[in-house]
Image: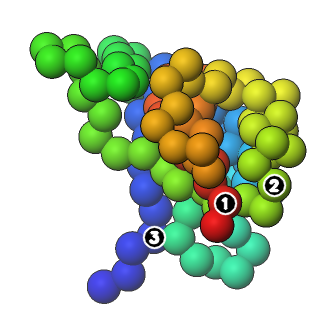
Amino acid sequence: MKLTSTVLGAPDPHALAAFYSELLGWPIRTDEPEWVTLRPEDGSAGLSFQLETGHVPPTWPPVDGAQQMQLHLDVEVDDLDEATRTAVAAGAVVADFQPQDDVRVCFDPAGHPFCLWTR
């Protein structure tokens, strides 16, 4: 068995794929009306985006009774401030609540949380 992709639902899978393509530098490999896949040049596991018209972004930080986060992406970076500026320029929003100094919690354009972090 081989994991090929993590899939994120979005009301606009093409826009979300464009965001992550810019953020990660990965090319689009599959581009269909309701499904888009990014994969790094080395062919390893990538990200896919599927149409979910009823997508509800999770609440961060968690709140009882609200939509819960089911996953988030961790992206290791060399320079946290520079990576945060790049993510925001691509369309991310930095979360108000930041639990750690060496991590930046952000939301992609569909509201999925992801973390930029450095060692």
- Residue at image position (46%, 37%) is 99
Residue type highlighted by circle 2: Asp
For label 3, the crowd category at 10 Å Cα-Cα, with few meaning under 14, some 14 to 19 and many 20 or more, is few
- Residue at image position (23%, 18%) is 63
Which marked residue is nearer to the observer: mark 3 or mark 2? 2
Residue reaching furthest to the left = 65
Residue type highlighted by circle 3: Thr
Q: CA distance from mark 2 to mark 1?
A: 7 Å
Q: Is residue 22 left or right of residue 33?
A: right
The answer to which quarter of the image holds residue 107 is top right
Residue at which label 1 appears:
118
Residue 81 position in % (x across, y down): 81, 42
Return the disc, 2 or 1, that comes first in the chain's sequence: 2
Residue reaching furthest to the bottom = 1
The numbered dot on residue 79 is: 2
**Disc 2 + disc 1, Cβ < 8 Å:** yes
The numbered dot on residue 4 is: 3
Residue 57 position in % (x across, y down): 39, 21
Q: Is residue 66 left or right of residue 26?
A: left
The answer to which quarter of the image holds residue 41 is bottom right
Q: How is the image coloured?
A: rainbow
Q: Is residue 27 left or right of residue 111?
A: right
The answer to whether any part of residue 50 appears in the image is no
**Disc 3 + disc 1, Cβ < 8 Å:** no
Q: Secondary structure at mark 2?
A: loop
Residue 114 position in % (x across, y down): 53, 41
Q: CA distance from mark 3 to mark 1?
A: 25 Å
The C terminus lies in quadrant: bottom right
For label 2, the crowd category at 10 Å Cα-Cα, with few meaning under 14, some 14 to 19 and many 20 or more, is few
The numbered dot on residue 16 is: none
Q: In terms of depth relative to the viewer, which is nearer, 88 or 98?
A: 98
Q: In terms of depth relative to the viewer, which is nearer, 99 or 65?
A: 99
